[in-house]
Image (cartoon, rainbow, N blue to C red):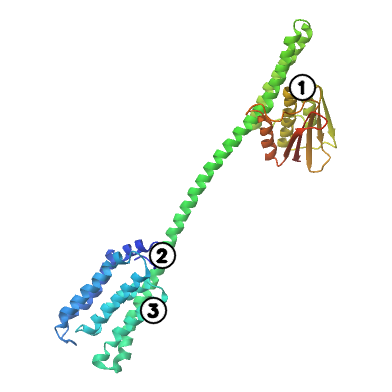
Amino acid sequence: MLVCHPMSPPALECHRNRTGSLYGAFAFASIVLTCFVGYLYSGRFYQPAAMVPLSFALGALYVALGILSSDWLKSGRPRAFAAYFLGQCAVLTALVFLSPLRGFFGIIVLPVVSQAIFDLGKRGAFAVSLYLFLVSVSVWVTDFGWTQVVEVSLNYTPAFAFTIAFTLITKQALNAREQAEKLHQELEAANQRLREHAAQAEDLATTRERNRVAREIHDGVGHYLTVVKTQLDAATALLPTQPEQARAAVANAASLTGEALHDVRRPVGALRADTARLPLPAALQALAHTSGLPVAVRVEGEARPLPPAVEHALFRAAQEGLTNIRKHAHATAANVRLDFRAPQLLTLVVTDNGCGAPAAPASPAAGFGLRGLRERIALLGGAVETGNRPEGGFLLRVEVPA
């Protein structure tokens, strides 16, 4: 048996499994056979013998309704349940009162009592059980009067009590099993969602790593290649008239190429182990010397130790700012200011005396470096501000908690 309730979503499957199963058929058939076997050995009929065929017909109808009710009740509508139990109660009433037998024949109502407990609410099950108990007892009034009602009630009470108790225990056990199966399905669904979330997290981590590598290539190698190209262009222009200065420019370009190679190797080494690096102020001074134009570096406040991620992000920010100045600003000088004065905030400002930024980017790819810089700083909980200065030139301002 399965526990079923009217109007519940699994009502169709519950009733198909319960009343259409071999167990349901066996329950009805065994009770009916037990009752009708009494015709074989009973020596006394309380009704005319002509009622025997009618009893068998009513018994067959009772069994048919009980076994085949799953197709009728599959909709789970309350009206279907009400019609079924009203019909069964009517058939049982006629069967109990019209049967020539008495006594043992009363237990034929017990399968419907069990059904009512499974299928109806507390009130409905109580009403059906009480009615069928009264039918089984009151039939004796016809032949023996009210004096036998108490004794007959005591005889039938254990059978009804056992049926009700056994049904309630079975119903509780099946409810527990159904709940366990439901929890198992929910757990499987939760595990599936976790697997999907893990896959999404892995994809997100891969995407973030790709973006980080793209920023490293742009901010590092891109900066050095810009400066190297500037030096080589200068060497080409100076070679006919000033070969010594051209040679110095080529040597500087070669040195910068070595630094670019080191800059490429640095992220790879950082993935393996922490490597020693210059403090941020010293790193900015070194960057200024290789930028290809006059750059003044100023540190305000007392320098303090910084997390490696913050140092690296600010170094890349200064590198990006100087690269953009070199490529686009047509500036003759630049300034880099590192401000430690705020206790939990670090500010980097890069300015120049150039022409400033145009109103719109020259191409869809323009601004990739600043976009990557904003992503890098956002990961640290900081902010990036850019724009043209009123007095001329361009400003890049970066603030990070540190």
Numbered disc in front, either 1 or 2: 1
Looking at numbered disc 3 in the image, what kind of residue is underneath it? Phe
* Residue 99: x %, y % from top left: 20, 82
Q: Tell me, for residue 330, which label it has, or none.
A: 1
Q: What crowding class fits label 3: few (fewer than 14 Cα within 10 Å), some (14-19), or many (20 or more)? A: some
Looking at numbered disc 2 in the image, what kind of residue is underneath it? Ser
* Residue 137: x %, y % from top left: 30, 86
Q: Earlier in the sequence, mark 1 or mark 3?
A: 3
Q: Quadrant of the C terminus?
A: top right
Pointer 3 and pointer 2: residues touching (CB < 8 Å)? no
Q: Tell me, for residue 126, which label it has, or none.
A: 3
Compared with 79, 142 (above or below) is below
Left/right placement of residue 108 relative to residue 324 reads: left
Q: Nearer the viewer, residue 200 or 1?
A: 200
Residue at x-position 60% and y-position 36%: 208
Give the CA separation, mark 1 to mark 3: 95 Å
Left/right placement of residue 172 relative to residue 289 reads: left
Helix, strand or loop at disc 1? Answer: loop
Most extreme residue toward the front is 359
Q: Nearer the viewer, residue 184 or 196?
A: 196
Q: Quadrant of residue 313?
A: top right
* Residue 33: x %, y % from top left: 21, 74
Q: Tell me, for residue 84, which label it has, or none.
A: none
Compared with 300, 120 (above or below) is below
Helix, strand or loop at disc 3? Answer: helix
Tag 2 residue = 8
Q: Nearer the viewer, residue 314 or 195?
A: 314
Numbered disc in front, either 1 or 3: 1
Compared with 328, 44 (above or below) is below
